[in-house]
Amino acid sequence: MVRSIIISFLLLNTYCEAQTLSKITSDHIRIDQAGPRDAMMAPIIITTEKVQVVAPESFVQVDKRLFESLSEYIKSSEDLLREGGLDEFGVFKVTSFIDGKAETYFTGTRQKSAHFFKEFRTLLKDLGSPEELIQRVDKTLARIDY
């Protein structure tokens, strides 16, 4: 009986840890699904250095020049709002963590998300981003652009 309680506790603890967001303290950009969680999409995490993340999350490391360009695009994008929008599938939360300061934006609607990701993808291609990052954006875009 005691053994089964301990095993249950360990399994529950492992499951709960896997559901938490990674605590990244270095500069990064994180794009998470903000709408309903019935059709989960993996977050896109962009950093300038290697970081430890909780499975199933993963990150893409880019150079400082590319990271700064992406950060500037996020700050100036007309598709991003300072407040959350509709609670619908395809809405994203974009967090930019630079020099210890976090700024959070939301896409607001699925249509704005699709437009944001199309523009983001174009910028990634123009700046010579790693193919892995472009593929992640393409995968997300394929799920929301219909």
Image (cartoon, rainbow, N blue to C red):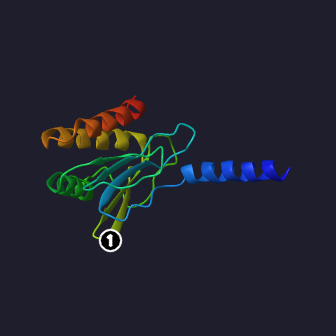
Q: Quadrant of residue 112?
A: top left
Q: Position of residue 41 (x, y in %)?
A: 46, 39
Q: Is residue 120 left or right of residue 44?
A: left
Judge by depth and name the residue closer to the eye, 119 or 95: 95
Residue lying furthest right: 1
Q: Position of residue 54 (x, y in %)?
A: 47, 51
Residue lying furthest front: 3
* Total residue callouts: 1
Q: Which residue is rendered at x = 73% and y = 49% of the image?
A: 7
Q: Which residue is rendered at x = 19% and y = 57% of the image?
A: 68
Q: Which residue is rendered at x = 32% and y = 71% of the image?
A: 100
Residue 19: in sight, yes or no? no
- Dot 1, how many residues are within 10 Å of its Cα: few (below 14), some (14-19), or many (20+)? few
Q: Position of residue 24 (x, y in %)?
A: 39, 61
Q: Vertical placement of 112 versus 97: above or below? A: above
Secondary structure, mark 1, is: loop
Q: Is residue 87 left or right of residue 48?
A: right
Q: Quadrant of residue 109?
A: top left
Q: Position of residue 30 (x, y in %)?
A: 36, 53
Q: Vertical placement of 94 versus 41: above or below? A: below
Q: Which residue is rendered at x = 83% and y = 53% of the image?
A: 2
Q: Quadrant of residue 134?
A: top left
Residue 74: in sight, yes or no? yes
Quarter of the image where the C terminus is located: top left
Judge by depth and name the residue closer to the eye, 26 or 95: 26
Mark 1 — residue? 100
- The residue under label 1 is which amino acid type? Gly
Q: Is residue 129 left or right of residue 136?
A: left
